[in-house]
Image (cartoon, rainbow, N blue to C red):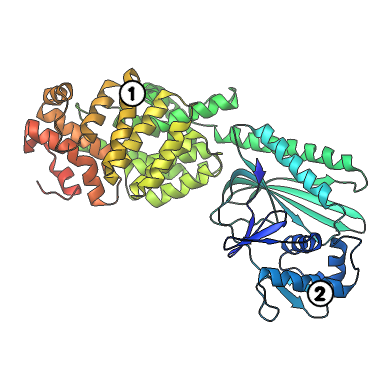
Amino acid sequence: MGKAQNLSFGDLILDETCLSARRNGQTIQFTRNERALLLAFTGNPRRLMRRSRLLDEIASEADRSDRYIDFLVNRLRAKLGDNKKTPQYIATQYGEGYVWIAAPSRAVPIDGFLIIGAAFGPQGHAFRQQASSLLGQLRDTVAAGVGFGHKVVVAENWSPVATDKLHYFLQVNFQADNGRLDCVATLREMPSKRIVRAFRLQLDMSDATSFTSEAIRVANGVIDALRQALAEASTGLGTPADEPLEMRLHKASNLLSTSNPQWLASGEQLRKDRAQDPLNPDIALQWCMHLFARLVLTSPFGGMSLEERERIESEIDATVLEVLPAIEHNPLLMLAAAKLLYFINRGHIELAEDIAERAFARTAEYAAALPILGQLRYARGRFNEAVQFFDRGIEMAEPGPAFHLHMRVLKCLALLAAGDRVALDAAAADIVNMGARCPPEIALMVGWTIAAADQELPAASAQALAAAGPAGALSAIEYLYFTSARHLIAEHERANVMHGLIAHVTRLHGEQAIPAHVLRKIGTQS
């Protein structure tokens, strides 16, 4: 929970209460009436503020003449370094009043689950404290209700910018007229701006309790809408709808984020379900996840023919593209589609990015989205961003050891592709520390992959690679290439992932154990 960042106008930074400002390390102090005018100006940007309106904002014991307002404005201009003839902040509308013309800039983007943005129409200042209290109650009640550690922020006269990171926006508009205060709150999904719920508040300016009761009523409505959105985001891929939301989110994360053996075991049942309901997009994507599991859960040493891999990936490709229009309402299925399109590596990276980002905006950042978002950054060579997503997943306690292992392996691959050996060694040690929770074949593949090309393998690891034989070693290279290297756009980054394993296999089994098609893809001819 919290307030938005201080307002910035270029090198001028205003304290949110306008008690002071900073410019180039220097502090600017304001009197009470100067502060009142600043609050009125910055709260009503690019709006004509008549002198009579500004008089209503200042202390009642002050001079009540228009000339006093002109005096205060000139004093503000002097403190702000503004020029009457070429103003940056306060422009004069001759014969009428003044206009705040500066456009705010934020040094730090707003990052939160929900932002409550208040907008005030032309009105006196009598109710402003009550309105601010209402916003604070909305923030506190919603934050307590949605839980999961989601950040709720209040910002007056806020409008979205590209650098902001948020999922929902509650726009609260106040308008006072003839002693009556009108207020409408609109909950929008971001960044699409789709309206989720709208509320009209019944506020009595003479009754402070009406502000409290309406804040609680609207907050509860917002909580219901947000929890419903979270529930919808965890529906699909066979997750039981009658389980608690938190459990469903964790299961969804594991279904999507790891190579879950459940998908292999359910193949026969999914085949029957597909036959009975061939137009069901959820079942279609579950079937694709089964096919995906066949590709990644096959033994790295047993191998799969290139023809069989091609056939399976072609079926995934056609099926996912066919169901895309039907899953736009379901973030979990969108994430599954993005994961599959990324994995088959058939030129769909922009499409996968679009689907994943839009799904992420509706999933409140639960863990299921993190691996695919990280992998999409990985494919682009944006390794620092990829590692940030993987680290965020590692920090989450809920999804379980399989999820954390998956995220740690992905992090190691990103660091390997980036050529960051120091960070890679530290990340690899974390996998070793997982001990028995890491399946033996994964541990072997990770060890061979991340060991530097000029580094000798530990005795047990070298014996296992030798025991695989030339055919098994060739299969291991193809497995690593198809699951982890081919997605990288840059050739030298693909080579970074493959060079270690290729070097170890070459020393043990000779060059005949290295697939020529892999060598061509990493810039080396056989």
> Relative to 272, is 331 above or below?
below
> How would you rate the neighbour count of disc 1 (Cα within 10 Å): few for under 14, some for 14-19, many for 20 or more?
few
125 left or right of 90 in image: right
Give the labeled residue for mark 1.
433
Q: Nearer the viewer, residue 333 or 442?
A: 442
**Three-letter residue code for mark 2:** Asp
- Element on which disc 1 rests: loop
Residue 267 position in % (x across, y down): 37, 25
Decide which of tag 1 and tag 2 comes sooner along the chain: 2
Q: Is residue 66 above or below residue 138?
A: below
Q: Say above or below: 505 vs 96.
A: above
Horizontal relation, residue 92 to residue 436: left or right = right
The circle drawn on residue 351 is none
Closer to the eye: label 1 or 2: 2
Quadrant housing residue 378:
top left
Mark 2 Cα shell of 10 Å, populated few (<14), some (14-19), many (≥20): some
Q: Amino acid at mark 1?
A: Asn
Residue 458, horizontal then vertical, whole percent: 17, 25
Say left or right for 226 vs 119: left
The quarter of the rendered structure image containing the N terminus is top right
Question: What residue is disc 2 on?
Answer: 70
Give the camera-side residue of 78 and 137.
Answer: 78
Q: Is residue 134 left or right of residue 5?
A: right
Q: Is residue 106 visible?
A: yes
Measured in 3D between alpha carbons, the distance from the residue under mark 1 to the one under mark 2, in whole angstroms, is 70 Å
Badge 2 marks a residue whose secondary structure is helix
Q: Are marks 1 and 2 in contact (CB under 8 Å)?
A: no
Q: Nearer the viewer, residue 177 or 298?
A: 177
